[in-house]
Image: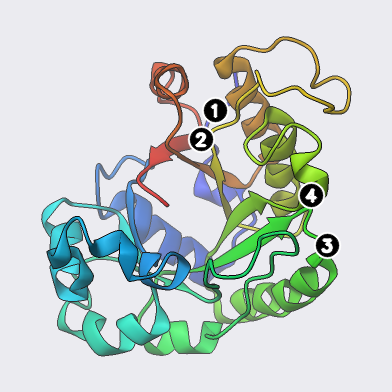
Amino acid sequence: MQTRPALGELGLNCGKKTRLRRILFDHGLRNGTALFLPYDQGLEHGPRDFFANPQASDPAYIIKLAIAGEFNGIAIQIGLAEKFFWDYAGEIPLILKLNGKTDIPSDAAALSPVHASVEEAVRLGADAVGYTLYVGSPAQEADFAQYRQVRADAERFGMPLIVWAYPRGAAIEAKGGKDSFYAVDYAARVASELGADVVKVNFPHPEKRDSVKPPYEEIFTPQQAIDGVVRSANRTLVLVSGGSKAGDEAMYRKPSRRWTPVAWG
C-alpha cells in the first residue's frame, strides 16, 4: 500500500510548500485530503450547463457556495477571478486555471490554449494554478511546449501546479477509451514525468480493455486500478474525480492513500 508522503518529501520549493500546505491543512478537513469546486464549465461547456439551475451562472453565488461548503479551493478562469474573486480573497484558496477551450470543435486533436499566466495568478493571490494536458492528442507536441513554459514559471514563482491529465484523441479511443485503466494510468505517469505537483485524473475503468496494450488486457479490480494509478504518479499527489459506484467504494476504502476523491469536472 502506498501512503501519502509528507510535503517535505515532494521536492517542493518554499513557495510551493507554503501554498500547498495552506490548501491541504488550513481548509477543508485539514488532514491532507482535499475537495475542490470547479467552475470552468462556462468556457468548457458553454451556458447550457446552467439551464437546469440559472443561479449557478452567477460566479459570486458559486464562490459563496464553495466557502460555505468548506471546500479546499475553487478553480476558475482568469476573467471570473479578476471580476469576482477579490470580494472573497483570503476566505478560500484560488486555483487559477491557465488554459481552457470550448467544446465546439472536435476533440480529435484536442489542445487547450493558454490565456493566463503564473504571474497573474500571483497577482490575484492564488494558491495554485491549473493546466489541462491532453495526453495522446495529435496536438500533444504543441501542448507539451506551452506546458513547459507554465511549469518553468510555476517553479520560478513558487506556485503549485495542478495538471488535469485527460487522455484524448483517436489513438486513445482505439485503445480502450479515455477513462480506461491503460489511458488514465498513462496520463498520471505523464503528468508526474513532466513535473506536475498534483495530477487530477478520472477514475480508471479496468473493464475497458478493447485493444489496450499488455498487461492492461488482464482482469483488474477497481481498487487495483486506482492503486496502479497512484503508483504511477509516485511523488505527484493524485486527485480523483467521480467514478462508478464500485469505483467510489474503492476510493473511500483506504483514505490514508495519497489520492482523494474530489468534486472536479
Between disc 2 and disc 4, whose residue precedes? 4
Between disc 3 and disc 2, whose residue precedes? 3
Tell me: 125 left or right of 136. left
Task: Tell me which amino acid carries mark 4.
Answer: Ala
- Disc number for residue 214: none
Task: Please say which color scheme the image uses.
Answer: rainbow
Mark 4 = which residue? 170
- Between circles 3 and 2, the one closer to the viewer is 3
Mark 2 = which residue? 258
Check whether the beta carbons of the residues at disc 3 and disc 2 lie within 8 A of each other: no
Query: Looking at the image, which residue is at 69% across and 58% down?
Result: 134
Between disc 1 and disc 2, whose residue precedes? 1
**Real-space CA distance between mark 1 and mark 2, rounded to the nearest whole angstrom:** 6 Å
Check whether the beta carbons of the residues at disc 1 and disc 2 lie within 8 A of each other: yes
Q: Choose top left, top right, bottom left or bottom right for residue 105.
A: bottom right
Check whether the beta carbons of the residues at disc 3 and disc 4 lie within 8 A of each other: yes
Helix, strand or loop at disc 1? Answer: loop
Mark 2 burial class by Cα count in 10 Å: few <14, some 14-19, many 20+: many
Mark 3 = which residue? 138
